[in-house]
Structures are given as structure tokens and as C-alpha cells.
Image (spheres, rainbow, N blue to C red):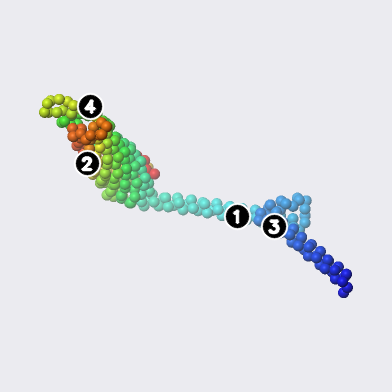
């Protein structure tokens, strides 16, 4: 083979390889994850084999997508039915307090707080914890102390727990709680030693423990309870309304007497559970 012929054969081989590479490159560029996007790249009048193949792939892709959507719909319906069956089972076999464990309500009554808001959470089948915020107004006409009278708004915050004695919708319970209370006081103190009245202003605070017993109705979302509450103040403090907040025993005695007079009370609570 002459040199010229070898050169010609080499050039021909290079041309063939280049054309094969070009065809492979063209094929790779036409491959698309979205078969319908690939089919749309062809002219609608193109009836070539590649165009026909792309259109068939697009129809197959749409069919698979429809099947996947139907499967998702069936799974969603099955999951919804499972949840509904579980909720129906709970309503039939579990106490209402377990099915609807969180409740919020308003209360009125007597004792440490005469009105307020209460929130509770049933953490176990028969055990609930609760927190409440309440107030109690005392004015000059209330004979709260043998030492004098006062005017103030008692603000209280309590944390406690209740134990229910059965799983029925109507259940007796017993409870215990801790509370802290404070007030900005205006008071008149009668001094028997000289028969005079002293006008006092200041701030007072106290810590208390309480015990209670009552009856609660839990019907669907309704929560209603009536309970007797007894509170004991194990710490009291009262200070004058001056720059250094001087402790004042006269003010503290009136404050203590007001707490003692409201040591026991009855509380009615109505709320909603979810």
C-alpha cells in the first residue's frame, strides 16, 4: 500500500468515526427524563421513528403518572379511614378526659381567687395537671380584720394536680396545688393603745398550699366542675410604699387576716376541652 493510499484510508476512517460520534452526540442530546418534553421537541408533522418513539414514551409516562396519582389517592383514603376508626375506638373505650386531654375554662367562686381562668392537661388516665390565674377584689366595706379594713386587688397564680376516682364522665376528684398571691394595699389600721386609725399603703405577698375535693362532668367538649378548696398561707410579707420598702407588721397583720378570712371557698368552673 502506497503512502498516499494509507493517508486516504486514514482520512476516511477519521470521517466515519466523526460521523458516528456526531450521531451518538445527537442521540444523547435528545434523551430527556421527561418523555413528553422530548416528544414536544419534534415537529407535529414529523412521522419519523424517533418522533413516534418519543410520543409513545410520552403516552406511557402519562399513564404511569395517572396510576401513581390513583395510588396516592387510595392511600390517602385508607389513612383517613384508619384515623377515623382509631378515633371511634377511643371514643368507645377511653374516658372523655383521655380523648380530649386539654381543657380551658373560666371559674367563679369564693376563697383565695373569686374569678379567673384555668387550663388543664390530662397526662395520665386519671391524673390531670392544671394552672390558673385569678383575682379577688376587696374594698373598704369588707370587715376583713379586727385590726382594720383595706382595699386591694389580690392577684394569684396557682399550679396543681387532680386525681379522678373513676373513668366515667361524671367523676369525683381530689386535688392539691401551690399558689402565690400579691396585692397593692391601702388599709386603715386601728391602734387600740391610743384609739387612732392609721392610713397605710404598701405591697403584700404570700405563698400558699391548697387541698380540694369536688365533682367534674366531662361530656364531649364540655368541662364543668364544682369543688371545695381550702388554702393555708405558710408565708406572708408586707412592705410600706416607701423608697426602701420597709417591712410593716401592721400591714402584714391586715393582709394575713384577709387571707385567713378567705381560707376556704367554693369554685365553679366551666370550660371547653379539645
The tag earlier along the polypeptide, 1 or 3, is: 3
Mark 4 to mark 1 CA distance (whole Å):
79 Å
Mark 1 to mark 3 CA distance (whole Å):
24 Å
Nearer to me, 211 or 196: 196
Residue that extends furthest to the bottom in the rendered view of this protein? 1
The tag earlier along the polypeptide, 3 or 2, is: 3
Residue designated by label 3: 31
Residue designated by label 2: 235
Mark 1 or mark 3: which is in front? 3
Mark 3 to mark 2 CA distance (whole Å):
82 Å
Residue that extends furthest to the front in the rendered view of this protein? 244
Residue designated by label 4: 140
Nearer to me, 89 or 64: 64
Find residue 198 and report its image quarter. top left
Asked if the residue at tag 1 contacts the one at tag 4, i.e. Cβ–Cβ closer than 8 Å, the answer is: no
Residue 147 to residue 76: above or below:
above
Residue 176, given in percent of the width and then of the height, sits at 25, 46
Residue at 75% in and 50% down: 44
Mark 2 to mark 4 CA distance (whole Å):
24 Å
Mark 4 or mark 1: which is in front? 4
Find residue 181 and report its image quarter. top left
Amino acid at each position: 500500500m502506497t503512502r498516499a493510499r494509507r493517508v486516504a484510508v486514514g482520512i476516511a476512517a477519521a470521517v466515519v468515526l466523526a460521523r458516528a460520534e456526531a450521531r451518538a452526540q445527537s442521540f444523547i442530546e435528545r434523551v430527556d427524563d421527561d418523555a413528553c418534553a422530548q416528544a414536544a421537541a419534534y415537529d407535529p408533522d414529523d412521522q419519523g421513528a424517533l418522533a413516534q418513539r418519543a410520543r409513545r414514551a410520552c403516552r406511557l409516562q402519562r399513564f404511569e403518572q395517572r396510576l401513581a396519582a390513583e395510588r396516592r389517592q387510595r392511600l390517602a383514603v385508607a389513612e383517613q379511614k384508619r384515623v377515623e376508626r382509631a378515633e371511634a375506638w377511643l371514643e368507645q373505650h377511653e374516658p372523655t378526659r383521655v380523648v380530649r386531654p386539654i381543657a380551658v375554662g373560666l371559674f367563679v367562686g369564693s376563697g383565695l381567687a373569686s374569678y379567673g381562668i384555668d387550663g388543664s392537661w390530662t397526662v395520665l388516665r386519671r391524673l390531670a395537671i392544671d394552672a390558673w390565674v385569678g383575682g379577688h377584689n376587696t374594698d373598704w366595706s369588707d370587715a376583713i380584720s379586727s385590726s382594720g379594713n383595706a382595699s386591694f386587688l389580690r392577684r394569684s397564680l396557682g399550679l396543681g394536680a387532680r386525681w379522678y376516682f373513676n373513668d366515667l364522665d361524671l367523676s369525683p376528684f381530689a386535688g392539691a396545688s401551690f399558689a402565690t398571691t400579691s396585692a397593692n394595699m391601702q388599709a386603715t389600721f386601728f391602734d387600740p393603745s391610743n384609739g387612732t386609725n392609721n392610713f397605710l399603703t404598701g405591697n403584700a405577698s404570700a405563698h400558699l398550699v391548697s387541698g380540694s375535693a369536688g365533682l367534674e362532668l366531662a361530656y364531649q367538649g364540655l368541662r364543668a366542675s364544682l369543688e371545695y378548696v381550702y388554702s393555708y398561707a405558710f408565708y406572708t410579707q408586707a412592705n410600706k410604699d416607701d423608697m426602701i420598702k420597709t417591712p410593716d407588721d401592721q400591714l402584714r397583720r391586715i393582709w394575713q387576716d384577709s387571707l385567713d378570712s378567705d381560707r376556704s371557698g367554693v369554685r365553679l368552673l366551666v370550660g371547653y376541652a379539645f
